[in-house]
Image (cartoon, rainbow, N blue to C red):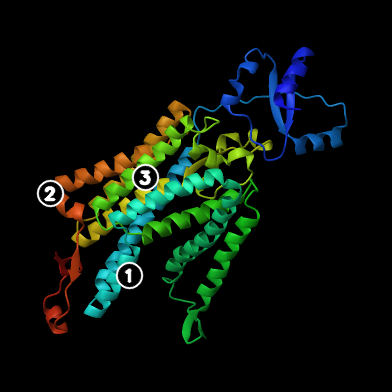
Amino acid sequence: LSIQQSVDIRALSAQEGILHASGNGRPLPSKDYWNKSEFHDVKILIAFISRKDFIDMKQTLGDNITVKMYSPSWPNFDYTMVVIFVIAVFTVALGGYWSGLIELESMKAVTNTEDREMRKKKEEYLTFSPLTVVIFVVVCCVMMVLLYFFYKWLVYVMIAIFCIASAMSLYNCLAALIRKIPCGRCTIMFRGKSIEVRLLFLSGLCIAVAVVWAVFRNEDRWAWILQDVLGIAFCMNLIKTLKLPNFKSCVILLGLLLLYDVFFVFITPFITKNGESIMVELAAGPFGNNEKLPVVIRVPKLAYFSVMSVCLMPVSILGFGDIIVPGLLVAYCRRFDVQTGSSSIYYVSSTIAYAVGMILTFVVLVLMKKGQPALLYLVPCTLVTASVVAWRRKEMKKFWKGSGYQVMDHLDYATNEENPVTAGEQIVQQ
């Protein structure tokens, strides 16, 4: 029976309530569904269980089943927000700091023209120009629309891409730590190249983690832990790898993605047939699809473990974009600090601004009781803070265009010994 048919039958029979068994994978009806005119006069209690649970109950208890309804009160504060806050700020801060370390090592290592040319080519491959930023945002919009209309097929493509990319990212993150360990550096030769055995085992471990998640991704009890670990590594690796060359590119990227976020959350409900935003639909799995896009940090609601987790596992989510996009600005601030020797003022202030933006997002979420586009609060907080710091330090022009530099050649080793200089002093501003 449909919900409407169940309501009609029970209402005519003057029953006290309805226990509706829905098919596996079908989501609960939305608020808009219950606002239909045919439900306005319904005065009976309605509860939902899965069809699988109903069959198990019938096999165990027989046909004579007595049901007692219980609705736990909503908590005043969702402690899951604290966990998501820590994950997001940790990922952004560490990813940005890692980007600065690579910049510093690159500045110290480049000492000749040949190395400079190799570094320049590598940077051009990793750097987002303003045109690249615009193209990237357009591709994101097209991909969002394609996912909405062809979700049934494209969701598996996204899962496959996530498995490959997250396994590689997890390897990059852990390999950077393992290389710092001085012991256990046994190597083997393969096609003329020396490969560390420990890194070989590490690659197998990272692949295994991704495969286990892919196989058990719909296991609500623990699969979210693997998804979050892979997601943190994925976000951190992108923040470290992708480089915005100047503040101008940061403003363009964050500004366009802010408009993108607002459009797909607030504007698309006026366009779609069911009145739901495309962003929310894709996050929940549109049209009752049981598969979810693995592009979010998922944390079970801690307040529900005692009661609600018996029936379902409600989760709070934060999209990867809400970590990566502001994280690219934080990474640029860290690299600018390294290039100009500004004592990490840009990096620290932008990281704090990101944390404040996250807190503001959660406050609005609690007050509005509705999902919010986090970039609506993160983008202004981070961009305004970085701009104010640059303006106060009278470095806005340099910060806007980027601190282009060239590393001076060592004309003579003895000269450098007599006149030692720091890495920051070896920079010639263009």
Q: Amino acid at mark 3?
A: Leu
Crowd band around label 1 with a 10 angstrom C-alpha radius: few (<14), some (14–19), many (20+): few
First-in-chain label (1 vs 3): 1
Which residue is depicted at the point 15% across and 74% down? 420
Q: Is residue 145 visible?
A: yes
Residue 356 disc label: none
In the rendered view, would you say 135 is above or below 101? above
Question: Residue 246: x percent and y percent?
Answer: 24, 55
The residue furthest bottom is 192
Q: Considering the image in quadrants, where does the C terminus appear?
A: bottom left
Horizontal side of 351 relative to 90 (left or right) equals: left
Q: Amino acid at mark 1?
A: Lys
Q: CA distance from mark 1 to mark 3?
A: 26 Å
Question: Residue 393: x percent and y percent?
Answer: 14, 49
Q: CA distance from mark 2 to mark 1?
A: 31 Å
First-in-chain label (2 vs 1): 1
Give the residue pinned by disc 3.
257
In the rendered view, would you say 350 is above or below 75? below
Question: Residue 186: x percent and y percent?
Answer: 50, 81
Horizontal side of 44 relative to 361 (left or right) equals: right
First-in-chain label (3 vs 2): 3
Give the residue pinned by disc 1.
122
Give the residue pinned by disc 2.
394
Q: Amino acid at mark 2?
A: Lys
